[in-house]
Amino acid sequence: MDTHILIVDDEKAITDLVGIYLRNEGYQVTLAYTGAEAAKAILEQDFDLAVLDIMLPDIDGFELLRTIRADHTYPVIMLTARGSQNDKIEGLSLGADDYVVKPFRPLELVARCKAQLRRYTSYGSRAQEEDSAELTVDGLVINRDARTVMVDERPVRCTPLEYSILLYLVENRGRVVSVEELFRAVWGEEYMSSSSNTVMVHIRHLREKIGDDAANPRFIKNIWGVGYTIEG
């Protein structure tokens, strides 16, 4: 089945252009120019990735992101003319995987879509190199074949980035993983000063999902000034 991407932007010229580039790469693309059109598509169709403009004339991109994250874990890229740090943190806190500020080059957005899709579809690849598909730490169970997370036998629905962060920390349990190392390993991009906030927001969101108290963590421990570790 073709990889299906949703593009939402009220600037029709931009939306249509991005759609052309992605279709040229062989992807199935659904275009939406209003929040209402996008919400209907999200509820009625299956997607592998969504690109959401924040500033829409009716339902904003953050609300659409909430709708997606209520039932789905596929990657979401936020697309907006607003580049403030608060907007970025809000989007990441709601479960966005990437954030692109206008104006942008269409080929850059296509590259970011490809990177997110690779991450989304290849989480299980390292499991083939290991003897066991399951990793267990104090009631936390990650099944790399099924790409699932359980805490005390309770299923935890993670986004691809959250899953990748947790998997990397568990695979490296017993040692401190620096913020820079974690960012490079999970995002696959060069580390910059703003990358620390990106990692912090995703760790906070992940902790909420696995029931980890930051003040007295059971799983993910913060070593101040160094990074994060999972003992075990």
Image (spheres, grey):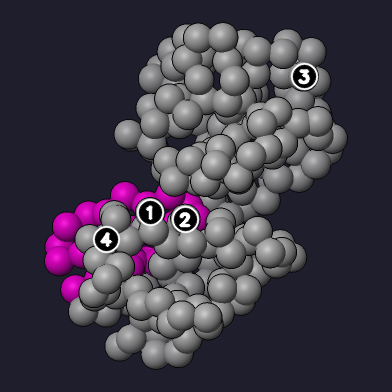
Q: What amino acid does circle 2 point to? A: Val
As for residue 145 lying within the magenta part, the answer is yes
Q: Position of residue 38 (x, y in %)?
A: 51, 16
Q: Which residues are magenta?
A: 139-162
Amino acid type, mark 3: Ile
User: Residue 83: where, in percent of width, then height?
Assistant: 68, 37
Residue 156 in sight in this render: yes
| Comes first in the chain, label 4 or label 2 | 2
Q: Find out whether the residues at labels 1 and 3 contact each other: C-beta distance under 8 Å.
A: no
Q: Earlier in the sequence, mark 1 or mark 3?
A: 3
Q: From the image, tell me which residue sits under label 3.
A: 14
**Residue matched to label 1:** 205
**Residue picked out by circle 2:** 201
For the residues bearing labels 2 and 1, Cβ distance under 8 angstroms: yes
Give how far across and how far down residue 8 sits, in percent: 61, 20
Q: Nearer the viewer, mark 4 or mark 1?
A: 1
Tags 3 and 2 in contact by the CB under 8 Å rule? no
Task: Name the residue located 65 percent from the left edge and 13 percent from the top edge.
Answer: 10
Label number found at residue 56: none
Query: Which comes before the other along the chain, label 4 or label 1?
Result: 1
For image coordinates 76% across by 25% down, the residue present is 18
Tag 4 residue: 210
Question: Can you tell which of label 1 and label 3 is closer to the viewer?
Answer: 1
CA gap between label 4 and label 2 equals 15 Å
Q: Residues within 10 Å of mark 4 (few under 14, many from 20)?
A: many
Spatial separation of the CA atoms under disc 1 and disc 3: 31 Å
| Nearer to us in this view, 202 or 37 | 202
- Give the amino acid at mark 1: His
